Amino acid sequence: MNPSGVSSFVVALNRAKKVVVTLVFLGLAAHAGAQDYVSSEDRSRFREQPYEAAEPGMLPPSAYIEMAKKAVHQKSDITFLHFSDGIVTRRFYRNAPPADRDIICVQFVYQGSVSGGGLIGRGFIAMNADQPTPVIEALIRKDRSKIYLEAVHYKHR
């Protein structure tokens, strides 16, 4: 190998090191950006992934959103004018009964004005003065035999 070939190899190696370091820092920054809120639920109990298309033996996300809306309407008089369209994820719970380990979660995030205290929908969601964002969650068993409704709050750190 001639001397100019060695120096070009060293330059290429230095560039590769810089690229790897840059990618690591970008990954850390993206992870930190995704963690800029806290939730009132214990998120260590499950792992979660987006549910964007129907999987074999399951419904499309839009069907789960409609099921969740019907369940919420049966429990309260909340209108969805100030809530997001619905975010569908799939959760895998640890240490839950077998029927409750694989859950479809539909979240409706409140997008209205959040000010002081108050109630939304006959007290289904209680607002606090420190302005957390209320979220209605419908947790649907994979076999659709049961739907759990919860009100959780997200707050920016």
Image: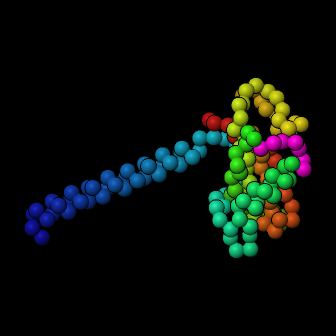
Q: x and y percent of residue 32 in the render?
A: 53, 45
Q: How many marks?
A: 0
Q: x and y percent of residue 103 in the render?
A: 76, 61
The quadrant of the rendering that contains the C terminus is top right
Q: Quadrant of residue 78?
A: top right
Q: Nearer the viewer, residue 39 or 96?
A: 39
Most distant residue in the bottom direction: 56
Q: Is residue 48 left or right of residue 126?
A: left
Q: x and y percent of residue 44 in the render?
A: 70, 52
Residue drawn at (81%, 68%) of the image: 143
Magenta span has 110? no
Q: Is residue 36 left or right of residue 154?
A: left
Residue drawn at (79%, 32%) of the image: 127
Magenta span has 75? yes
Residue drawn at (82%, 38%) of the image: 125
The quadrant of the rendering that contains the N terminus is bottom left
Q: Is residue 149 left or right of residue 56?
A: right
Q: Quadrant of residue 89?
A: bottom right
Q: x and y percent of residue 47 in the render?
A: 67, 58
Q: Nearer the viewer, residue 90 or 62?
A: 62
Magenta range: 74-80
Residue drawn at (72%, 30%) of the image: 114
